[in-house]
Image: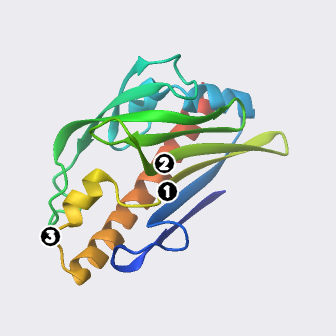
Amino acid sequence: MSVTEHNIGRDGETAGNSLFQARAAVRISASPQEIYEVISDLGRSGDWSPECLGGEWVSGAPGAVGSVFRGENLRSEKVVAWAPVVRGTWFTESEVVAAEPGRTFSWAMRDSAGRKQQSVWGFDIEPLDGESVLTHRFRMGAPTEGIGGITSGMTSEERRRFFREWGEKIEKDLETTVARIKAAVEGG
């Protein structure tokens, strides 16, 4: 089982309550608790993320609501190559906003002043017939500091193109991430 969908607003306007949202799901032969132990360890995210190389907890108890994680990321020159997105290695900070063992784990990206943005990544786990369904999701309610900088000088058509191509990239990243988590969890 693999499901992926994304919804993007046109011309930087919200699509429903979101500027952008995407999700991918996969069925995994493991308990929700086993999966949760893997997904809530953001330091291991480099094992499955196409962009995040890993990182470290900088405040709070690892994986607890309110804790802050500093992630190291690497983006290819090919990603939305025509747009002024960050290339190479860069760092982000995020704050855990939900942590329910065996059910859900999510974090909000922070801006350069340390404020939570409306950019939330997360995982949801549901038991199903002795296995589990893992859903990886992303939602951007309003442009982040970074997205605002990228799109500020764009025309309406360029913004539509950017969000379409960015959506395709996020969709592929979510699919890759859940597939790699499935392999890691089921492989041992």
Judging depth in this view, the residue of 180 and 61 nearest the camera is 61
Residue denoted by label 2: 120
User: Does the residue at mark 1 contact the one at mark 2 (Cβ under 8 Å)?
Assistant: yes
How far, Cα to Cα, is label 2 from label 3?
A: 25 Å
How far, Cα to Cα, is label 3 from label 1?
A: 23 Å
Q: Nearer the viewer, mark 3 or mark 1?
A: 3
Question: Which of the image's four quarters has the C terminus?
Answer: top right
**Three-letter amino acid code at the position of disc 2:** Val
Residue 57, above or below 156: above
Tell me which corner region of the image, top left, top right, bottom left or bottom right, holds residue 131.
Answer: top right
Mark found first going from the N terminus, 1 or 2? 2
Judging depth in this view, the residue of 155 and 81 nearest the camera is 155
Q: How is the image coloured?
A: rainbow
Residue denoted by label 3: 153
Residue 139 is marked as 1
Q: Is residue 147 left or right of residue 65?
A: left
Q: Is residue 171 left or right of residue 143?
A: right
Residue 109, above or below 11: above
| Callout 1: SS | strand
Judging depth in this view, the residue of 15 and 47 nearest the camera is 15
Q: Is residue 82 left or right of residue 26?
A: left
| Callout 3: SS | loop
Q: Position of residue 34 (x, y in %)?
A: 68, 27
Residue at 21 percent across and 37 percent down: it is: 90
Q: Position of residue 160 (x, y in %)?
A: 31, 78
